[in-house]
Amino acid sequence: IEGDIPAEEFIHRVVSLPPAEIPDRYPSALKNLIKQMLEKDPQKRITSKEILEIRDVAQSLKEEKENKENKQQMKVQENKDRKQEQKDDQEIQSTISSSCVIL
């Protein structure tokens, strides 16, 4: 079983053997990026700056950031709505209580 190899053997494999082939079900652009990230020679390996300059990566990160901001805005609005509902409920209860006293 692959997970049961000694640490030294694992390190040897990572350093010495080429990475496994990436399945064809993944887009070629993604497979190429992963291959560039797994390049053993640090001088040839893609840098994080270069990765962030890839249009698809930058777009994905931008969308993720926007989604996160939208979720935060929705939570803030939900909290405001909940507080307003509680305030409305208190006013209704107060009106009902006042009406009961008058009767």
Image (cartoon, rainbow, N blue to C red):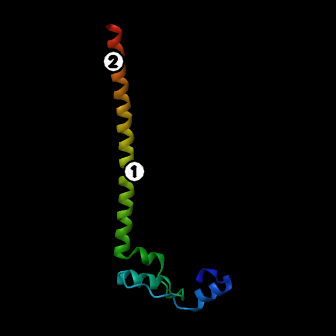
> Mark 1 highlights which residue?
72
Give the structural element (helix, strand or loop) at label 1. Answer: helix
Left or right: residue 11 compared with residue 35 = right
Q: How many marks?
A: 2
The mark nearer the N terminus, 2 or 1, is 1
Instruction: Reply above or below: 55 against 20.
Output: above
Residue type pointed to by label 1: Gln
Residue kind at label 2, given as amino acid type = Ile
Q: Position of residue 71 (x, y in %)?
A: 37, 52
Q: Secondary structure at mark 2?
A: helix
Q: In this orientation, which residue lies closer to the viewer: 50 or 18?
A: 18
Front label number (2 vs 1): 2
Which residue lies at the image location 35% right of the left edge and 43% below the top edge? Answer: 77
Which of the 4 quarters of the picture holds residue 40? Answer: bottom right
Give the CA separation, mark 2 to mark 1. Answer: 36 Å
Q: Is residue 65 above or below residue 2?
A: above
- On the picture, is 17 further left or further right than 103? right
Q: Quadrant of the C terminus?
A: top left
Give the residue pinned by disc 2: 96
- Write down the quadrant of residue 80 in the picture: top left
